[in-house]
Amino acid sequence: DQQVKQNSPSLSVQEGRISILNCDYTNSMFDYFLWYKKYPAEGPTFLISISSIKDKNEDGRFTVFLNKSAKHLSLHIVPSQPGDSAVYFCAARGNAGNMLTFGGGTRLMVKP
Amino acid sequence: GAVVSQHPSWVICKSGTSVKIECRSLDFQATTMFWYRQFPKQSLMLMATSNEGSKATYEQGVEKDKFLINHASLTLSTLTVTSAHPEDSSFYICSAGGGAGGKGGYTFGSGTRLTVV
């Protein structure tokens, strides 16, 4: 039973365009969401987070949107750069235990 | 700030031997450490949560006698894979946090690739 899902295993985008990565969740008790970028054989790198009391958070080229009613969040990267090519994971925190539940990841490829 | 050092980065061991992976918080105290494993092209799966000075809490399906976790101090947590078998080959990652601070409140180690031959 996957509580956090990333339905697109891969995404290809042209350099300079917008990348939109999507994430859906089922547990309404999640109160905090995070996005990570990950390369093979490395730990995840934190990108941006959002609390469940907000619907948008922006940091430079990265913006996360949260739609609580739809249990959906998305990460927008604009403009996309070839260096953004990696696997992106969304993660959610429940209000018990502080542990994170990860989605399956989306491989982003930004073409020059 | 908030760095977690994980060692070793990679290890190859013979089947039946034990391997210890260390995670150290370098500039902060980690009262809680999470241990994950990741199979190729899959997500990070939480194995266990450890709190300093107490027994670890294991996720369903994770053998606590096989994956020994020790969190004896606020700066060090270890995962020992006992009697390793080829199916234990995976990428193991630790994470400290769950509190406030940079990096979303969680700090990940760089991971350990374990290959059991």
Image: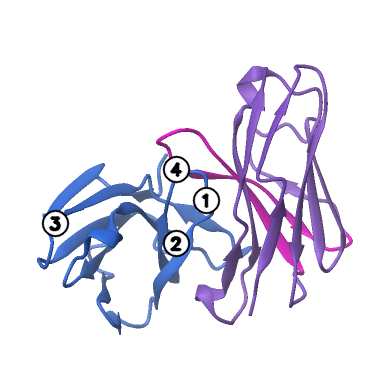
Chain colours: A blue, B purple
The quadrant in which residue B9 appears is: top right
Q: Which chain carries label 1?
A: A
Q: Which mark is residue A92?
A: 2
The residue that disc 4 covers is B43
Q: Which chain carries label 2?
A: A
Residue drawn at (55%, 68%) of the image: A95
Q: Is the Cβ of the residue at disc 1 closer than 8 Å to that at disc 2?
A: no
Residue drawn at (17%, 62%) of the image: A19
- The Cα–Cα distance between marks 1 and 3, rounded to whole angstroms, is 24 Å
The quadrant in which residue B77 appears is: bottom right
Horizontal and vertical percent position of residue A10: 23, 44
Q: Residue A42 carries which label?
A: 1
Q: Is the C terminus of chain A in the top left, top right, bottom left or bottom right quadrant?
A: bottom left
Residue range (magenta):
B31-53
Residue drawn at (76%, 19%) of the image: B14
Which is closer to the viewer, label 2 or label 3? 3
